[in-house]
Amino acid sequence: MHDTRPLLSNSDFPAIFRKPLEILQVNLGYLCNLSCVHCHVNAGPKRTELMGLETLEQVLALADSANIQTLDLTGGAPEMHPEFRYLVRTARDRGVKVIDRCNLTILEDPHYVGLSEFLAEQQVEITASLPCYLEENVDKQRGKGVFKDSLAALQRLNRLGYGQQDSGLQLNLVFNPQGAVLPPDQQNLEQAYKQHLKQNYNIVFNRLYVITNMPIQRFGSMLVGQGQFDAYLDLLRNSFRADNLDGLMCLNSISIDWQGYVYDCDFNQMLTMSLGASIKPRLHISDLNPDNLSGAAIATAAHCYGCTAGQGSSCGGALTAK
């Protein structure tokens, strides 16, 4: 695995500063039932890192004290955390919106029977990775059989009301490019997804999010190995659009890793780039004062061009399509 952080440190990305905190994005651990090529976390079935219960309680305490509106759960496969259901229930009981960043196949795993029903019961918003609507492309990127299991999971979610009009159960899909290119236009691709999935599999969903692949972790290492890293970084830099800066997700959110350390975003977490407002090498959630975040500087490097290139990219999809 190539460490791409030194290749990203020399950056002229413009300075950006925080707005009031609204979202906690929490990485519950790197354990996952898949090992996807584009994964910026390098998650997989052999990873053992999982958030401890004490840290999980600290996340809930911060959500209370900072009046957090959204708890955005990621991993790995966040559902594989043994306290996933406890965390979701507790947050929902407190009126916090919960987003589950789901790889879909976990819903078909026999060890997680009833998970789909639980998510529907708790009215969890599902943001699910489906990097293409063609079987060959999905299995190439994510592993043999993933497409078939993903379709079965989507059909299961549809039967529970997810993606259905006026159900209140939000189902969003996520597209990642196959290689070192920018994603296509989000609105046009969403229509293509909806038409293909409805006509061929009778599957419906609410929104499609296109997300730019970041030159870090597994994907970044692949670029280095193929001699494409510099060219891809040039593509991101040359596609910069200043009007995307105001829509960046890092402005109103923080990312918390499985050990409880705080970062400006999920990508910075994977690069172990300290919170921009921190005076310490790493700031733990137990030492965080959320009142000090608004107006603070955000730590940036060259990978940040991935969020501002072209139509922009965030965990909520393209920035210019909103």
Image: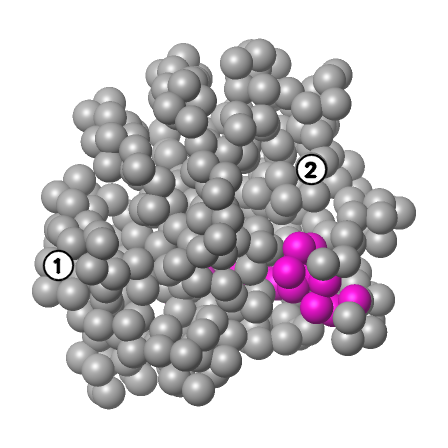
The amino acid type, in three-letter code, at marker 2 is Thr
Name the residue at 62% across, 32% down.
263
Counting every numbered tag in the picture gives 2
Disc 2 residue crowd, few under 14, some 14–19, many 20+, Cα 10 Å: some
Q: Is residue 83 left or right of residue 210?
A: left
Q: Which residue lies at the image location 12% right of the left edge and 43% below the top edge?
A: 121
Say if the magenta span includes residue 219.
yes
How packed mark 1 is, by other alpha carbons closer than 10 Å (few <14, some 14-19, many 20 or more), is some
- Give the percent coordinates (x, y) of residue 111: 22, 54
Whether residue 246 is visible here, answered yes or no, is no
In the rendered structure, which segment of residues is drawn in magenta?
A: 206-224
- Which dot, 1 or 2, sits closer to the camera? 2
Look at the picture and state if 9 lies above or below 152. Answer: above
Q: Residue at x 81, y 51 (%)?
A: 8
Q: Residue at x 53, y 28 (%)?
A: 259
Residue at mark 1 to residue at mark 2: CA–CA distance: 39 Å
Which residue is labeled 1 in the image?
161
Task: Please state which of residues 100 and 257 is positioned toward the viewer in this rendering.
Answer: 257
SS of the residue at dot 2? loop
Residue 33 visible here: yes
Observer-nearest of 313 and 32? 32
Q: Residue 88 in the image: state x and y as whole percent.
A: 26, 34
Image side of residue 194 versus residue 229, left or right: left
Q: Residue placed farthest to the right in the image?
A: 10
Residue position for label 2: 272
Would residue 257 be counted in the magenta stretch? no
Res 40 quadrant in image: bottom right
Asked if residue 284 is positioned above or below residue 205 in the image, the reply reads: above
Q: State yes or no: discs 1 and 2 in contact (Cβ < 8 Å).
A: no
Q: Is residue 139 above or below residue 221?
A: below
Kind of residue at disc 1 = Gly
